[in-house]
Amino acid sequence: MVEKRVCVIGAGPAGLAAAREGARLGLTVDLFERSEIGKHIRCGEGFYDSMHLVSMPQAGVCYKVDEALLKVKKEYRVDCREINLWMIDRAEWQKNLAEQARAAGARIFEYTRVTPHDLHNLESKYDWVIDASGIPSITSVRYGFRDYYRRNGAVTVQYVLEGDFSEQGRRLKFLPFPYYQGYFWIFPKSSAIANVGFGYFDPDGEERNLPGRLMWNWLDQLMAREKVTGKVLRKNGGIVPIRMRERLQYGKLLLVGDAAGCASPLHGGGIDAALITGRQAVRWIAGIEGLRNRDFSGEIWRILYPKLEIESRVCQIWKELDQEAVDVAAALIAMNYKEIGFRKWIRYSPWLARNFRIGMRLRRGLTTGRWTN
Ligand SMILES: Cc1cc2nc3c(=O)[nH]c(=O)nc-3n(C[C@H](O)[C@H](O)[C@H](O)COP(=O)(O)OP(=O)(O)OC[C@H]3O[C@@H](n4cnc5c(N)ncnc54)[C@H](O)[C@@H]3O)c2cc1C
């Protein structure tokens, strides 16, 4: 193989996956991280392998999630045993990924910030530059689309709380809002620590322009309603980009992970898409067999489109649903059919018939990772 020099910007999941895979493929990889690996992470730390394309996390696993709680009007238990979902300690997991990348031969430089001005030098020094800098990406600053992420992102706030979460146990809890506004989450890492937050997920909705102060007030109110208490260890949150950019290549620059805007439009999970796109970028550079597109953007779209398409359609359906209808949908997801009751079966049967196919496709995607028709 002809030697190829690759620069990776950012040591989040996308950058680390690119560095590890690139080094394993024999590329010369240098990764630059502005901070320290595993620091300043903003995440609920639910690791959902939605496409069955990434392996189980090899470090930092808190537990495998076998059951989730879905609460709208009533609370439903969702069996997740068939779903590849883990609760992780992301800092520990990312440190391990970095060790694997280093062991494979990648060089990682921490506390080395890349600025948009550095890009020019990097492009002349390296054959390819992978931008895994999250949001706003370095590329977006240089090419003037920095605002894209805000306009096409979910807005979130989250506390890392110390408290008593033993009653919830090893279960993730989701409380979806009506009209696809988003959801409130309680993700315990242990009986004493949990990530608790909420996000507005409709990029076209008005709520997303709420001042940050009001978002935090709402989170406090949601917590009071659900009787969630504890000591705040950290406050974080921010934008999660949930509409993938059409263009992912700017000359020698390739966008991956959040920089590409590829977190899930339905729930905002972006770890798996970051891993997949980071890995795929170096495979594409190495020109390994099995890649169907000569165009990088086309290659990433080919892989992620079936899932993103179904998730976006489900969001459209959700936009029509009031609280009672979201409750019916939650009961269906939990396969708790008796809770729906005769009156609601009658009332919602036309809606159910209209959306039956997409519901089945969603169910198959969520459980088997197969999103194509
Ligand atoms: C509140 C919240 C909760 C979330 N919960 C979940 C969840 O439970 N599950 C899930 O799957 N996803 C979740 N997400 C989304 C997930 O965190 C992201 O999709 C994921 O981190 C994207 O990975 P990435 O590698 O693309 O970017 P990032 O993780 O953002 O990594 C980017 C890296 O680049 C570095 N960097 C940035 N600028 C520079 C620069 N100039 N020079 C050098 N380095 C730079 C940063 O320091 C960082 O290390 C959540 C997001 C938020 C905001």
Image (cartoon, helix red, strand yellow):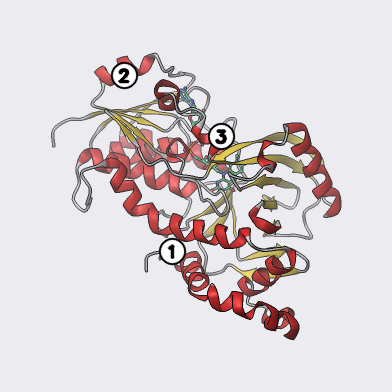
Mark 1 vs mark 3: give the one in front: 3
Residue at 46%, 30% in the rendered image: 133
Q: Secondary structure at mark 3?
A: helix
Residue at 44%, 40% in the rendered image: 257
CA–CA distance in space, label 1 to label 3: 29 Å
Which residue in the structure is indicated by mark 2?
A: 122
Q: Of callouts 3 and 2, which one flags the residue occurring earlier in the amino acid sequence?
A: 2
| Side of 352 where 188 appears, left or right | right
Q: Of callouts 1 and 3, which one flags the residue occurring earlier in the amino acid sequence?
A: 3
| Residue found farthest to the bottom | 342
Which residue in the structure is indicated by mark 3?
A: 150
Residue at 76%, 48% in the rendered image: 192
CA–CA distance in space, label 1 to label 2: 37 Å
Q: In x, y percent, where is residue 22?
A: 29, 38
Q: Nearer the viewer, residue 228 or 352?
A: 352
In the image, residue 306 above or below residue 194: below
Which residue in the structure is indicated by mark 1?
A: 369
Q: Cβ(mark 2) to ligand 1 < 8 Å?
A: no
